[in-house]
Amino acid sequence: MILGFDPGRDKCGIAIMDKNKKIYYHQVVESPKITTTIIELNQKFDINLIVIGDQTTSKIWEQNLTKIISEKVPIIKVDERYSSLEARDRYWQLYPPQWFVRLIPKGMRIPSKPIDDIVAIILIERYLNSKFNSLN
């Protein structure tokens, strides 16, 4: 299983996905709770790869993730640019707008919750797409 990790100071996005892009878990987690959450997820899903965004606080989190899971689990950095914009669009696909929100132009809608977990999903997809493209 692949752990997608969108690093942040106060909160982080986490997603668990397989190589066929099936999502098993996604959540936004407060930074102090990351260690416990990832240990539990690793016990449940047997994580064998970590994909992490390459921007904000990624170096610090990369070191922390190595300690939390194992030095044997590879950590791949993925270009995180524009992933938040992409996640915002994906949010509305996952949670279609209801009632009067549908009348608000798409670019002006603001998700009702943090989307860091969706960013983590997108990071895994970027990794898998780049891996697939490099094979062709």
Image: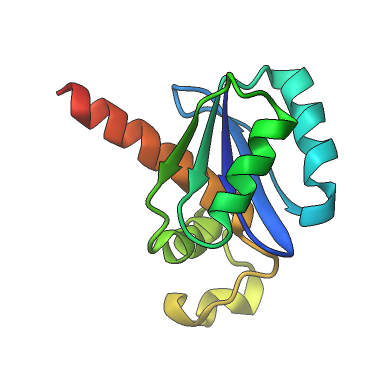
Q: Is residue 96 above or below residue 18?
A: below
Give how far across and how far down residue 115 sits, in percent.
Answer: 61, 60
| 5 relative to 83 in the view: left or right | right
- Numbered disc total: 0
Residue drawn at x 46%, y 62% as measured from the top left: 89
Residue drawn at x 74%, y 32% as measured from the top left: 68
Residue drawn at x 28%, y 35% as measured from the top left: 130
| 87 relative to 97 in the view: left or right | left
| 38 relative to 116 in the view: left or right | right
Closest to the observer: 14 or 54? 54
Closest to the observer: 41 or 108? 41
Residue farthest toward the left in the current orientation of the protein? 136
The answer to whether residue 129 shows anywhere in this view is: yes
Q: Is residue 56 above or below residue 73?
A: below
Give how far across and how far down residue 24 sits, in percent.
Answer: 64, 29
Give how far across and how far down residue 17 sits, in percent.
Answer: 56, 29
Residue drawn at x 67%, y 64% as measured from the top left: 114
